[in-house]
Amino acid sequence: MRLKIPLALLLIFLAVLAFRLYFAFQTPNFGNDAYFNIRQITHITEHDFPAFYDSLSYSGRSLVFLPLFHYIIALASILLPLTAALKILPNLFASLTVFVIYLAAYELTKRKDAAMLAAFISAFLPIFISETLLTVSEYSIMVPLTFLIFYFMMRVENQRLFKTVITTILIATFIHSSILLLVFALLLYLVFMKIEDIKFDRAETELILFSTILVIWLTILFFKNALLVHGPAVVWQNTPLSLLTQYFRNFNILEAIYKIGIIPFLSGIFIIYKYVFKEKFKKIYPFISFALVALLLLWLGLIQLSTGLMFLGVALALLFAQFYVIALEYLKKTRFSNLKPLFIMFLIAVLVLTSVTPSINYAKQAVDNAPSQEQIKALLWVKDNTNEEAVVLSMLEEGHLITAIAERKNVMDKKFLLIPNTQQRLKDINEIYSTSYATSAVTLLNKYSVDYIFYSINALKKYGEKPAYLDELNCLRLVYENTEAQIYETKCIMK
Amino acid sequence: MRKERREIIILSVIAFLILLVIPISRQVMHGNLPIGEQAYGELIKAQNPTNIYYMLLNIFNTSATQYLFAVLGVASFIIFYSLMKGFEPRKRLLTSLLLITAPAFIYTFSTINIHAFSVFLFLVAVKLMKKSKVFAFLIMLIIATLSFFGALLALVLTFIYFFTEKNRKSLIALLIFFFLILLRYLFFNPEKIIFSSSNVLKQMLSSMGAISGYSLFFVLLAVIGFIALWKKKNFAYLALLYLLITFVFFGTAANAYLVFALSLFAGEGLFIILRRRWVVRLIKNLSIAIIAVGIMFSTSTYCSRLADAEPNQEIVKSLEILDEELDDKLVLSHCSNSYWISYFSGKKPFIDDCSEKKKIETAEKIFYSTDLADARSILAENNIGFVWIDPEMKQGQIWAAPQQGLLFLFRNNKTFKNLYRSSGIETWQVLE
């Protein structure tokens, strides 16, 4: 049976793509974290290979990452200008989620209206928009890919799909390690089948076990060095302790509701409760398992809050489809059955209010958080006017800007794997930006052989006030200044 | 029978070649240096032998000893193979292959290690159990004198054996005897009982950095095998007891013994996978291919990691410098480096081993001291004349930052004199 794409779905897709691109092109720049991927993509376009040794990051270090996403964007840059590819492609991938969720929800409920609403929710999931709009993030492709694998799994009785499933899993494994979430979810799904006493489909079980072995083995292979250095703590990516509580902080329900939307959140929780404790429905267990795995990892602090909420949100959006079907069935049995159109209208209104409005806010926030043109100008000044070997100090958040735009060595950025003493390094940087003692600052500047200090308006916002020594010490010279950034050259030596 | 003999010969040759890889590559890369810290502790103890193992170690030189351990490994494997006589031939072959490629087996028989000798004796005792009980228990006694772990193992196994054989009188006698050995360890050498202290996963999986562990697939197969054997409850219960006691409490040391038991489970697991009727042939072939490649890959990366393990020539050079110093003072370092210090420098380490809590506290006071006068007085008080530092100590084992504590104080050249500095290794002399 061929499934026709309904016009409404196409409109949702175009709406979300237009929404994303509108905000993405509000700034010529990207989010700070995007610049790591941009550098790798640029490196591939220039040298055909990603840079697994980076001479600029941390003034020289080895990198551990999966490069397929970077290759995909680099390939696309043959057809499009690189900046356009970097803006359009991740947003296009993320927008494709609507089709995947529609297909999966339709397979689950066999109702187009339910599937359509689920697709709409997934399209305007605030956390998903915030995390993929300007970040050139692997998640923009991983989220649709993960749920596409689920969709294929639901149709696994068709053995012709086996090769497709295995290929998709392989592709996802080479894009991002978050594929492990899917593996854990599939294993939990098998447990559910056992607990609920649902007959195992042997082919499906074989496929799940094989996928588990394949993904875990490949992930261990890719991250071998990181595993040897950090051991099981690699799940926290060697994040400094002070940031760990910020990135992997405890799961807060109110925050989750705002970032996911109240309707998908509550309906999803209801569906999980209903099918875990009350009723059996084989096809829904993969998604329930996925949501539970995301919830569990969030609760245990084993996954970054934003990442966990993003995957959880999409899974709950999918579960909403089933909730919608149940709600309508229930409504039919009550004396308010004639109010069905009103109910649907109300639901859509609430959805728009609780999903689209926060999405707009998050999109605006993402645009505002991107580095300004003035900051970029300052960084380009560094690129044009300083020695190629110079070390430039910046805040942690701006580390990738130093390597990508100024093309100079930084002291620290957000790629922590394989770096010793990240906590101490971060503490030292914070000390330099906030201390009022010149001797302590100079000692630390010497420790990291810093030649230039990049002091942006964001540093002023973060630390409250500018350290006095920057303008008082004779060995520090202001060499560039604009309204949003200053560059200081340091020749200070601690004797 | 002929097929069986051919199989054991081929497998023994493979095992021998695998076990030779590490001593040979280390010979080429680092000269003749056994792996790890423990080996040097045993070489030092062998100079004044207290039991049969150290006596034997004293007879051979370091180089010959390393190769002898490979021979011991092959001999242990042959005995283990003969113990699997009643097994289905394919299952026996799979178990053997899994055993000889397991990192824990390779580690045990690639370095100077008391547990290698203990395992060998243990297998001999099990083999003799049916033919000559007295001789078997005499060997068990030797095992019990080798180490606390050996004593405990002998106790548990004797208990299991007599429990299944229902020979209660002998059981009581043996239990009393072995308890006496245990008490000896508990009351006279409590600090020598080193229980597992680090992360279980880190001790178990070689891919997570375990020095003597298992590949991921080996563990997965063992879990499958264990679940399958659960139906044969007697065996599974006993095995579970054994696994729990050995692994949870003894970690890495237990792996030398555990690898034999786990390879039985892993062999069963792999046998089940191969025998299973698969619905999708493609998945069966891919699964088997991944398991085979995964195990081979894990073994080869483990071998290269082990070949490159410390100590290396840099460490030896930095310590041999101390040998030239006439000053007979103590050497301060992390407790895990004590055996290297004694063996290569000829000087006494300040901390003999990691069970000396008071000395460790004193050492920490010195390591983290920011006051020069304070540090000087503690160093003098404890007769410490030298400080030896390796990269690990500077990467979190002691210090978290490059200029922390003593590392900062080293700048004072009136108190400290640098004798050696290369590849992150530093040797310092404390001036009077």
Image: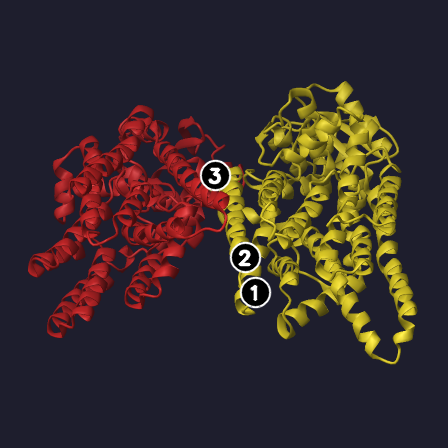
Q: Which residue is mark 2?
A: A187
- Asked where in the image residue A65 lies, by quadrant, the reply is top right
Tell us which disc is closer to us: 1 or 3: 1
Marks 1 and 3, how far apart in space? 48 Å
Q: Earlier in the sequence, mark 1 or mark 2?
A: 2
Q: Amino acid at mark 1?
A: Phe
List the single residue furthest toward the bottom.
Answer: A335
**Tag shown at residue B394:** 3
Q: Is residue A230 visible?
A: no
Q: Is residue B259 visible?
A: yes
Residue drawn at x 91%, y 74% is: A338
Q: Read off the chain for label 2.
A: A
Tell us which disc is closer to us: 2 or 3: 2
Q: Are marks 2 and 3 in contact (CB under 8 Å)?
A: no
| Marks 1 and 3 belong to one chain | no
Residue drawn at x 17%, y 57% is: B144
How busy is the neighbourhood of tag 2: few (under 14 within 10 Å), some, or many (20 plus)? many
Q: Read off the chain for label 3.
A: B
Q: Nearer the viewer, residue B308 or B16?
A: B16
Chain A representation colour: yellow
Query: Secondary structure beneath disc 2?
Result: helix
Measured as percent of width and height from the top left, residue B341 is found at: 30, 37
Marks 2 and 3, how far apart in space? 41 Å
Query: Secondary structure beneath disc 3?
Result: helix
Q: Amino acid at mark 2?
A: Leu
Q: Which chain is red?
A: B
**Tag shown at residue A192:** 1
